[in-house]
Image: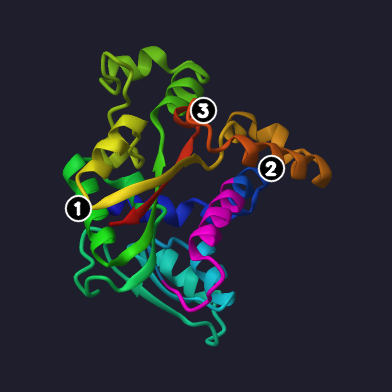
Amino acid sequence: MEYLESYYKSYNEEGRLLSRHGRVEYITTQKYIHEALGESKQKRILEVGAGTGRYSVALAKEGYSVVALELIEHNLNILKSKLTGDEPLQALQGNALDLSRFADNTFDLTLVLGPMYHLYTKNEKLRALSEAVRVTKADGFIMVAYCMNEPTVISYVFGLNKVRETLDAGMLTKDWHCISEPKDLFELIRTEEIAELDKAVPVKRVKLIATDGATNYMRGLIDGMDEDTFSKWVEYHLTVCERQDLIGASHHTLDILQKE
């Protein structure tokens, strides 16, 4: 946990999400959140790993009842600073691996948009997913975000000429899967591993989408676009973000599940 605390104290996560390239991920995720919520505002939402509240605060300001759970105190303090006190939002410190404070079948939508980035074993991932499913109502939705393996191999290992360094450090398997430890901060995954996790819990997959697609491969270009060109990029991205032939190459994906 000390690695995460240090990272989030020095990294401007809020700035990333507000940048043009970060907005693609946000716009896409919000699109699918609202599809799951439907027309009624009488929905209870839990965000596990709420970070600085980019999603939780926005949803609460729309009138949804939100519980925001965040592990890192620094992030939680930023989240709370955005509140006026009028929002139907409860901000709590807690861990994705233990949602025992919440009863079974409590929430209409459970968001897990960050924790899987920092869980390094299959057992940890499955525990977090199982807990999220448990607290979600029957027929409710669970949305889980992942960081994908291939973009790091392409953009970091090869793009920054780190091939020999990463191989010598034992950070890659023979089939080019990145090996992460807590000090590396981010855990990377492939689509088949996500599918294996889903099989272990009582859910059906609705969709697996690429939340940023090709965006992060061309951050400089995206951030330099004028607003009209950027809107066209978002329009293009939203037309292809469900294409399964492109999913594994996205830096971030969103697994949309429905509890059975």
Provide the secondary structure element on which disc 1 rests: helix
Q: Is residue 104 above or below residue 184?
A: below
Between label 1 and label 3, give the one nearer the viewer: 3
Residue 132 appears in which quarter of the rendering? bottom left
* Location of residue 181 by image quarter: top left
Q: Residue furthest bottom?
A: 86
Q: CA distance from mark 2 to mark 3?
A: 16 Å
Magenta span: 25-44
Magenta residue check for 161: no
Residue positioned 68% across, 33% down in the render: 220
- The numbered mark, 1 or 2, whose residue comes first in the sequence reads 1
Tag 1 and tag 2, C-beta contact below 8 Å? no
3D distance between C-alphas at marks 1 and 3: 28 Å
What percent of the width, then of the height, locates residue 121?
Answer: 20, 40
Comes first in the chain, label 2 or label 3: 2
Residue 151 placement (x, y as % from top left):
47, 27
Q: Is residue 32 left or right of residue 239?
A: left
